[in-house]
Image (cartoon, rainbow, N blue to C red):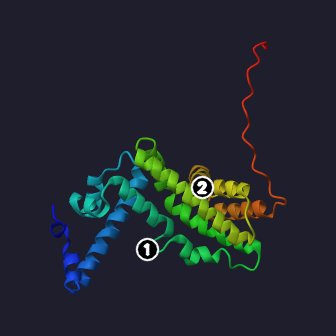
Amino acid sequence: MSAASTARPDDEDRAAGKRRYRSPRRQMQAEQTRAAVIAAASRLFSQRGWVATNMRDVAVEAGVSVETLYAGFESKAGLLKVVLDVAVVGDDEPVPFAARAEAAAMGTGLTMQARARTAARVVTAINSRIYLLDQALRQGAAVEAILAERLTASEASRRAAVADGATLVARRAITEVEVDEIAALTSSVVYDLLVRSSGWSNAAYEKWLAGRFIEAIQRSPAPARPRPTKKEPLDENSE
């Protein structure tokens, strides 16, 4: 196949010095369709989990064709990824969390306690949006390799965000153990256990989390990460 035959119309227009016209109305319709699909998928993944949610049901819920769904998101796994990404930051704007006002706010309080309370408020808002979707991801990761990879990448990304946020709150370098502790505390799994399973309110969870942040950061000196224990060789003479 020749290079000319694989050129896209956009490429040909640019080569000819033309600018492709994009209808504002069509673009608005596309954005509305995407928003409807993300909202529908978020509801179904949250209510049904990974296994019981299928693309046809999402298409019906969103009022679009299955073909439109696949054209925009490629696969069920791709759709869940987008839904989770949107849930983390709260919208579909292409702005990473680290560049948002919520992230910056964690480092602007006059005292560490004030910054910890801001961080707890931010984490509570995020976990309230994602905890059911995170359960869907974990359910899917048990049966789909691509979702297992997504979960691993998500946890690595979350850990990096925890380290950045804790550094803003503490205004000093954060140890690996502190990152371990705060990453565990801020997990959506813990949020689910306390809020959904134990009946805590979001306000109670937020207050508890702020207290744990303060304890973890104020501890001096910070604990060392425990070394893995080596398995002792079996003594053949022992009974």
Q: Is residue 53 left or right of residue 103?
A: left
Residue shown at 50% from the left, 63% from the top: 129
Foreground mark, 1 or 2? 1
Using the image, determine if residue 10 lies above or below residue 161.
Answer: below
Question: Which secondary structure lies at badge 2?
Answer: loop
The disc at residue 187 is: 2
- 134 is higher (above) or lower (below) than 143: below
- Between the residue at mark 1 and the residue at mark 2, the CA separation in whole angstroms equals 24 Å
Q: Between residues 221 and 228, which one lies in front from this camera angle? A: 228
- Residue type, mark 2 in image: Ser
As rendered, which of 115 and 225 lies closer to the eye?
225
User: Is 65 in front, or is 10?
Assistant: 10
Q: Quadrant of the rendered structure where residue 191 is?
A: bottom right
From the viewer's perspective, is 153 left or right of 11? right
The quadrant the C terminus occupies is: top right
Determine the image quadrant of residue 220.
Answer: bottom right
Q: Which residue is mark 1?
A: 94
Image height of 228 relative to 152, above or below: above
Percent position (x, y) of residue 166? 68, 66
- Disc 1 packing (10 Å; few <14; some 14–19; many ≥20): few
Q: Give x and y (percent) for residue 10.
A: 22, 77
Q: Is residue 179 left or right of residue 43?
A: right
Please tell me which residue is depicted at 45% across the width and 46% down the height of the picture.
141
Please name whichever residue, 124 or 226, is drawn nearer the observer in this view of the structure.
Answer: 226
